[in-house]
Image (cartoon, rainbow, N blue to C red):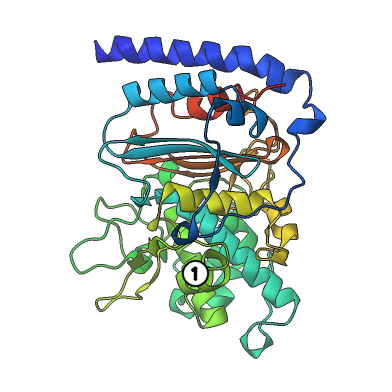
Amino acid sequence: MRKTATIIVILFLSMVFVGGLQRAVAGGLPAQQVASTESYYPPPESAGGWRRCKNDEEVRKLAGMDPQKLDQVGRVTEALYGGPWVLLVIRHGYLVREWLGAPAMPQTTYDVWSSTKSATGIAYGLLLDYSRHHRLPHDAQIDLDSKAYSFIPEGYPLTDPRKADITIRQLLTMTSGIPGESHGLVGLQVTPGGGEFEIALGRQRERLGASAAKLYATPGDGWDYSDAAFSHLSLIFRHVTGQEISDVMKAHVFQPIGIENSSWDLEGGGGNIGPHTNAHSGLHLTGRDFARLGYLLLHGGEWKGKEIVPKWWIDLATKSSQSLNPSYGYTFWVNTDGKLFPGVPKDAFAFMGYATNRCYVVPSLDLVVVRLGYGPTPIGPVEIPLGSIVATVLK
């Protein structure tokens, strides 16, 4: 019965999605639906948080969305998913709708899983920009074409001589040749006494026997979604800056934009390399605070007139980075070719993690959509909320 009900729900959402997109996208966006020029930035939750649409009239007038269709999305989501979750919509700086799955509250934090990778990408935007402006300790120089292992002394001796050619660019775009999910290395599952960074560097096998010791392809010649590759970024960041990714992000990004309720897991230690920031998973955020991060990128990295994240990095990171997988930018999933989110504007991009943890950003619609929870896993209609929400945008 549940399978049948799920199919019915998917068909219903698809009808809502397709019907609305003909108005919202196919004919081009009307001027009033392009990103608002009003400079609004929400205060922290402790100081009042996001401004809100208080009724259906304000949803239409201030957010330019169809409240009845939004409510349909909420009802379907509540029927389809159990357990704690949150789905919220931000448009023109207004918290338009927020749905919660019991027993979640607005203050509930969730592990955003691999959405963490995009936060790591933001940290690397800061790092590369600091290098450009000679703001790193000892005037360290690092750019996208720098050799990654020149900043990882723990990586020597190399377990594969080809690793010497891996660049920062390749780590950030999943083209390093380090094995990942397609080659049996899913996550970094340690054996008793083992260490995550040792697995990432190819010094230990993970619990099920997979290894990162040998590259599956020459760097730049293959694409694989690799947590092992991403762990390298944590070590590099620490060696170049003398600080952890999590600490820099908290001080230079999270606090300035009002993120108050967050944590970031460490990995390693206990006699092994580390502990250091988990670059590929383990960032914990509330839905409202995750929306702040998306809203920051929506505004080109600016917050209250101050550049928090360099715009040049956001522009680069949120578009296709290579041809092996055009739906991947620099740590962000992107819609540059229109295939990742069919029918949604091509400037859309997303933080995307396991268990359908998402933050979608659609700059041309001035829209941020956050979905967090403990499931479902990435099987089924996991991207439908974005399409159905885009379909509620009014002419």
Which of 302/341 is in front? Answer: 302
Question: Can the viewer see residue 203?
Answer: no
Which of 289/217 is in front? Answer: 289
Above-or-below relation of 301 to 381: below
Crowdedness of circle 1 by 10 Å Cα count: few (<14), some, many (20+)? Answer: some
Image coords of residue 94 (percent x, y): 59, 42
Task: Tell me if 257 is positioned left or right of 373 in this view.
Answer: right
Which of 330/247 is in front? Answer: 247
Q: Which residue is mark 1?
A: 250
Image coords of residue 28 (percent x, y): 79, 24
Q: Where, quadrant-wise, is the C terminus in this rendering?
A: top right
Which of 131/191 is in front? Answer: 131
Task: State the residue at coordinates (41%, 44%).
Answer: 181
Task: State the residue at coordinates (61%, 50%).
Answer: 295
Task: State the residue at coordinates (55%, 77%).
Answer: 151
Q: How many marks?
A: 1
Q: Based on the displayed image, in which of its 4 quarters is residue 67 positioned?
A: top right
Furthest residue toward bottom: 138
Question: Can the viewer see residue 143?
Answer: yes
Task: Tell me if 395 is positioned left or right of 176 in this view.
Answer: right
Furthest residue toward left: 192
Task: Tell me if 226 is positioned left or right of 203 in this view.
Answer: right
Q: Where, quadrant-wise, is the N terminus in this rendering?
A: top left
Q: Secondary structure at mark 1?
A: helix
Task: State the residue at coordinates (55%, 54%).
Answer: 293
Above-or-below relation of 260 to 366: below
> The disc labelled 1 sits on which kind of residue?
Lys
Task: Tell me if 175 is positioned left or right of 98 in this view.
Answer: right
Image coords of residue 171 (percent x, y): 56, 59
Image coords of residue 331 (percent x, y): 57, 52
